[in-house]
Image (cartoon, grey):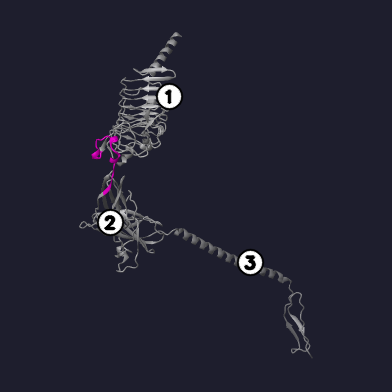
Amino acid sequence: MERLLFSLLLLSLTVKAQLCPKRCICQNLSPSLSILCAKTGLLFVPPFIDRRTVELRLTDNFITTVKRKDFANMTSLVHLTLSRNTISQIMPLTFGDLRGLRALHLDSNRLTKLVNDHLKGLVNLRHLILNNNQLSYISEGSFNDFITCLEDLDMSYNNLEQFPWVAIAKMVNLNTLTLDHNLIDHIEEGTFSVLHKLGRLDMTSNRLQKLPPDPLFLRTQLLVNAKGTQYFSLVLSFGGNPLHCNCELLWLRRLTRKDDLETCASPPHLMGKYFWSISEDDFTCEPPLITRLYSTKTFVMEGQSVTLKCKAIGDPDPSILWSSPEGKLLSNTSRTMIYDNGTLDILITTLKDSGMFTCIASNAAGESTTNITIGIIPLPHLVNLTNQVQEPAPGSSDITTSTKSGSPSNGTDTKSLQDKKVVATELSTTSALIRWPSQRPIPGIRMYQIQYNSTTDDTLVYRMIPSTSRTFLVNDLAPGRDYDLCILAVYDDGITSMTGTRVVGCVQFTTEQEYTQCHSVHTQFLGGTMIIIIGGIIVASVLVFIIILMIRYKVYNNTGEHKTVVSNMCSQTNGGQNGGMTQSSSKLTEGSEPQLPKEGTD
């Protein structure tokens, strides 16, 4: 019995030793358990940790990676400190089981980025300390699980150029935001509008040239409480930034501040001066002035590209917008590209681009506009597959129509343009797939133009296709119609700046008839059925008539046995010419009286 008790004691001591890692201090102060493993030379998180631990400190070690199994099932953990290690990698869902964690310290490590799965599961996190890392990227969803409960966020001394301001704007319980000593060059306007609990914002030593006006910053006013003590409702620190002291920062200059440590980096006449000592009259802006506006081409062949450039100066730097000849503001599309430097690229021109483009330069002091005109030379379009040329009316960028003329005037045979190199396959009631070979003999092809029309339609349709295409699916066709289609190559002639066209080939095809087979079968079936029905009625009527005649004939023969037949009746006359007896034969029907011969006269 004594040996059994001794064995159980040794086993309990062994288990206890396993739950407290070597060279660590374990404090089992009920109802909480703390494990302190500072400066113990750990290369990884000890595997034998009591899962009931409330506080775990692993500071000043050499841990490089943290994994999910390191903190699995530690639902009671409230405080986790991993400061001053060499952690460069956090495996996905490492903290997934730490639903009760309130504070996470990962400062002074080697983290370079945060993505959505790194901090997932920390639904009750209040304090997140990540300063003194090498962070250069933070995804928008990194803070999603604790976005409404986080109170303290420290991301200072990192390499952040961009910051998820959209996520910050949702942290309604945030009290302290520390972002000093990063590379942040802007703050999204309206970020702090609803952060009423924010008491400290540190943006010191970043690359900010301006701060957007925000209701939050109005709380930086000097206030006096009931005891007469002066205090600020918000501590705002933004010194060490290259502030551009112009009219955009006038709102900030008008606030009352106790300190005067911030200085201006520009414009030149205010460089190095204390922000709060500069007169409000010196915070000025200059309206934009357009200094250069030109086009790479004055006249452009339809379908070619053209570049418009607009440059402007002002304080602050003006932004450039473009307006089309139709008066609409242009944006980035598959056909037009606008760059921050004021360049407008029209990749494929159409007839609607012919006219006056407007460059609009604007900043906080005003705006300036200047116009430039370009002309679009329309491409020749084959009309009714002849050599006639007619300009199409202005249309959309990818499909334009022009009126088709009547019969050919030069007697050109339509079939002479038929080229077997262009084929129409996969014909249906409303579409056809057009194929054509590569045009190696034609250098400098910019694009292909497909034009087609129906023999029963007066409209010629054409489309612009990239030069790399070898097939094109023509849609919206009418069922059961004949179509004439030609492909033209649009190319640079290599001698002049003009664009030429050359016919690649033509093809004729007919779309399938809609439900042709079904209607034919139905019609034949219906006609045959009607013929059979009518013939059957006639045959039945004839048979019935014949049967009736046969019945009547039989009935008549059967009733003939009751008739009285009189034959060889002799009659005597008293003074006839023959003077003798006369024989006659007659038939008497039953019920009729026989007629006697009349007596002769003496």
The boundaries of the magenta stretch are 266-289
Q: Quadrant of residue 202?
A: top left
Q: Residues within 10 Å of mark 3 (few under 14, many from 20)?
A: few
Question: Mark 3 vs mark 2: which is more N-terminal?
Answer: 2
Find residue 547 and name its label: 3
Q: Decide: marks 3, 2 in contact (CB < 8 A)?
A: no
In what element is the residue under mark 1? loop
Is residue 600 shown above or below 278? below
Q: Quadrant of residue 425?
A: bottom left
Q: Decide: marks 3, 1 in contact (CB < 8 A)?
A: no
Question: Mark 2 vs mark 1: which is more N-terminal?
Answer: 1
- Nearest to the observer: residue 303 or residue 200: 200
Instruction: Estimate the spatial distance between the alpha carbons at disc 3 and disc 1, rounded to whole Å.
Output: 107 Å
Q: Residue furthest front?
A: 228
Image coordinates of residue 78 in percent, x first then y, are 41, 25
Q: Amino acid at mark 2?
A: Thr
Q: Amino acid at mark 3?
A: Ile
